[in-house]
Image (cartoon, grey):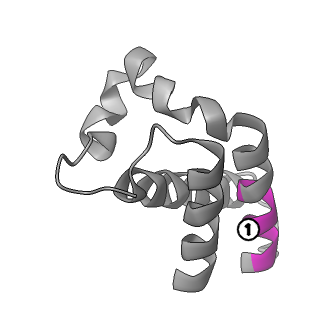
Amino acid sequence: MNDYHERLAKKLLEKNDHLSYYQARTWVELLWEDFETTYARAGEEYMGSEMTERIVKQWIENYGDKLHEFTAVNPKYKHFLEQDKYTLH
């Protein structure tokens, strides 16, 4: 799974230069978990990591350039995504 997260974090950094590597990786992990949890709650059969990667990749393509704006309207997630001043991408 680490390979999936790594690829997706790199993809997100290509789309959004406002994020550090740490933030991009956190976003990928949050989106991944959100999709799998929502899918399971809906009673759907697990389709594997490849399916989750496709969905998260699609979200990154559609919304990746705006993800840094999310914490402004959703302070609940701010502690997950605060900029680490010592980490650069």
Task: Specify whether residue 67 is painted magenta.
Answer: no
The residue depicted at 17 percent of the width and 54 percent of the height is 86
Residue 55 seen from this side:
yes
The residue depicted at 68 percent of the width and 61 percent of the height is 40
The residue depicted at 80 percent of the width and 51 percent of the height is 58
Q: Relative to residue 56, is residue 10 depicted above or below?
A: below
> Which quarter of the figure has residue 4?
bottom right
Q: Relative to residue 43, is residue 47 depicted above or below?
A: below
Task: Specify whether residue 55 is painted magenta.
Answer: yes
Q: Is residue 67 left or right of residue 81?
A: right
Q: What is the crowding at mark 1: few (fewer than 14 residues within 10 Å), some, or many (at least 20)?
A: many
> Which quarter of the figure has residue 67?
top right
Quadrant where the N terminus sits is bottom right
Considering the whole magenta stretch, tell me its main secondary structure.
helix
- Mark 1 residue type: Glu
Instruction: Choose between 27 and 51: the one closer to the eye.
Output: 27
Residue 39: image location, x then y, percent: 72, 56
Residue 12: image location, x then y, percent: 61, 53
Residue 48 seen from this side:
no
Please report the bounds of the magenta region as a residue range: 50-56
Q: Which residue is mark 1?
A: 53
Quadrant where the C terminus sits is bottom left
Q: Is residue 87 left or right of residue 73?
A: left
Residue 35: image location, x then y, percent: 66, 54
Q: Relative to residue 50, is residue 12 depicted above or below?
A: above
Residue 16: image location, x then y, percent: 58, 41
Give SS at disc 1: helix
